[in-house]
Amino acid sequence: MVIIKNVRVIKIEKGYYYFKLGYVLERKHISINKLMRDTETDFKVIKRLITGELLRIDIIVLARICNYLDCEMTDIIDYKKEDNLVIN
């Protein structure tokens, strides 16, 4: 696991998942508690979306968060094949 500018990068299979919710929240100056209250999302769910410590993703929750943050799903979670890895 690698941490880059509030982005968690986790190697899974033949690629990397980028968990970028922490970066988006920091950029928009929104706390986890505010996101939790305003989207009625459990704290543990939000923390797992930040840390990448999850087994499955609830797309309804992800859509609710994206609507609130006015962003795309790929702004929060992205997947890159091993040969497309870019570290800034």
Image: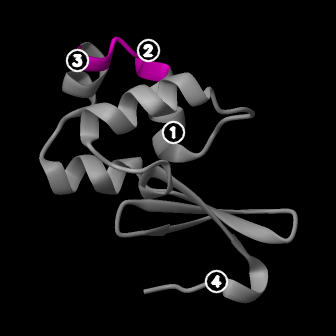
Residue type at mark 2 is Asp
Q: Nearer the viewer, residue 64 or 19?
A: 64
Q: Nearer the viewer, residue 86 or 63?
A: 63
Query: In which quadrant will I find the N terminus?
Result: bottom right
Name the secondary structure under disc 3.
Answer: helix
- With 45 as the anchor, is 15 left or right in this view? right
- At 63% from the left and 40% from the top, the residue drawn is 53
Name the secondary structure under disc 2.
Answer: loop
Please rate how many residues cluster around mark 1, counting C-alpha atoms within 10 Å: few if below 14, some from 14 to 19, many from 20: some
Q: Which mark is residue 58?
A: none
Name the secondary structure under disc 4.
Answer: loop
Q: Which mark is residue 49?
A: 1
Task: Work out whether mark 1 precedes mark 3 in sequence or the reverse, and give the earlier one.
Answer: 3
- At 76% from the left and 88% from the top, the residue drawn is 83
Residue type at mark 3 is Asp
- At 41% from the left and 50% from the top, the residue drawn is 72
- With 17 as the anchor, is 50 left or right in this view? left
Q: Residue furthest right?
A: 13
- Residue 54 falls inside the magenta stretch: no
- At 24% from the left and 14% from the top, the residue drawn is 37
Q: CA distance from mark 1 to mark 3?
A: 16 Å
Residue type at mark 1 is Leu
Task: Work out whether mark 1 precedes mark 4 in sequence or the reverse, and give the earlier one.
Answer: 1
Query: In which quadrant will I find the C terminus?
Result: bottom left
Q: CA distance from mark 2 to mark 1?
A: 11 Å
Q: Which mark is residue 85?
A: 4
Q: Position of residue 63 (x, y in %)?
A: 46, 32
Name the secondary structure under disc 1.
Answer: helix
Question: Which portion, as a residue range, is magenta?
Answer: 38-44
Q: Are circles 1 and 4 on residues that touch, CB within 8 Å? A: no
Task: Work out whether mark 2 precedes mark 4 in sequence or the reverse, and give the earlier one.
Answer: 2
